[in-house]
Amino acid sequence: MDYQQTIEYLYNTLPMFSRVGSAAFKKDLTNTLLLCERLDNPQKKFKSIHVAGTNGKGSVSHMLASIFQTAGYKTGLYTSPHLYDFRERIKTNGIMCDEEFIIDFVKRIRPAIEEVEPSFFEITVAMAFEYFARQKVDIAIIEVGLGGRLDSTNVVIPELSVITNIGWDHMNLLGNSLEEIAFEKAGIIKENIPVVIGEKRKETEDVFKKIALKKQAQIFFAEENFSVSYYHLSNESIHISVEDRNSTISSYQLDLGGIYQTKNILTVLQSIEILRDWKINSENIRSALKNVKRLTGLHGRWEVIGEQPTVVLEVAHNKDGIEQMLVHLKNIRYEKLHIIIGMVKDKDVEQVVQLLPKEANYYFTQAHIPRALDAAILQSKAFEFHLKGDYFDDVNLALQKALGKASQNDLVIVCGSIFLVAEVNKQLIAQ
């Protein structure tokens, strides 16, 4: 099989959560452990940082990877899902893994695939661990896929565990209260391994403290030690001044848009402070945060792809993410707002659409995956909350319509689903 045939084999043979939803979620670590055993346990051959959370875990993972890379360490980065190329999931120093490695890996592991019948995610996790072991990375930043306790990535023993925040998402799998969701995320806390909690909430604080105490894991709440004293948003970046517990103020320019990065940066700074054994200085941090996108290839977080009108890709897809997007909107200037939105079936659609501004122009659409919510159904649900607009079978048809209606001072946002953002044809903006 060549590379394309290999990828098609993975997509078509293995249950894939991003396409079919909860049917692909395996509720234990047995398959991952079996696969890793067949590979001589590559997860034990490199150091790691394990990052979970409802929102922000992707941004935090990329920021941490950028910092370690800038400090001179060979850095692995595992994230999911990908936007454009499967290989985005597995990178070393910002470079996607080789096609030849994927072909060879699948060829070698195919008997185990047929015997174990793993999910797509379980295979990609084992693949990433094997790649990082072969690459002899100094450290790998490992982003949790879903939850934490039962996530396939939860077979690593990291240098540090990080939980960015707790919000409402995947309730059908993780629980119907913030406490239950926090319990699942807290499953990544390991014996005697420190843990950073990005955002402190009264509903979840005790959950984390109890589990950390039980595991004898030192716990750090980033918001207790760092705070944002000033920030300024521009189109594709944010200037942030951060005050630490000693009242020392440090300023950073972050090349990631989105006001929510003011929270993520505190999580990152707290994490780096704990990892004192690694040789990382303040200049490494400043340079890395200024170049996250260039160094790691992060896309879709308030990513501006067009001007006059401004066109933004934003992977916000749940209640907390949409709330943060709306806070950002209050801090920038534009005339009219055009929202292109598509969601997946297993999200709480009502919880999201009731937050959205009624005065915006809406374009309801859907990604081309089985898990996508039909655009007409989304339009109908949104209409109940007085949101009005046409529906489109394809995001690029919706984008063409929005660009046709928008004036040069308007703002067009594509949001609601990572998979929808991935299907945007950026060439439309250049025409």
Image (cartoon, rainbow, N blue to C red):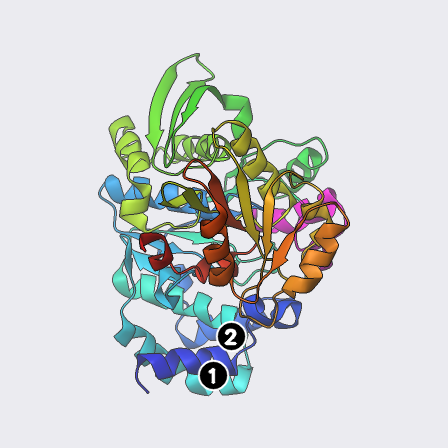
* Quadrant where the image shows the C terminus: bottom left
Would residue 371 appear left or right of 405 to someone viewing this image?
A: right
Taking 359 as reference, is 105 left or right?
left
Outermost residue, left side:
72
**Residue at the (67%, 63%) spot, across then down:** 376
Note whether residue 159 is visible: no
Q: Are marks 1 and 2 in contact (CB under 8 Å)?
A: yes
In which quadrant of the rendered image does the N terminus lie? bottom left
- Identify the residue under disc 2: 34
- Secondary structure under tag 2 reads helix
- Please state if 29 lies on the left or on the right of 351 as rendered: left
Whether residue 126 is visible to the viewer of this picture, yes or no, is yes
- At 30% from the left and 35% from the top, the residue drawn is 290
Give the labeled residue for mark 1: 112
Near mark 2 (Cα within 10 A), the count class, few <14, some 14-19 or many ≥20, is some
Was residue 314 drawn as part of the magenta stretch in this picture?
no
Q: Tell me which label, 1 or 2, sits earlier in the chain.
A: 2
Residue nearest the viewer, comparing 398 with 221: 398
Q: Is residue 175 magenta?
A: yes
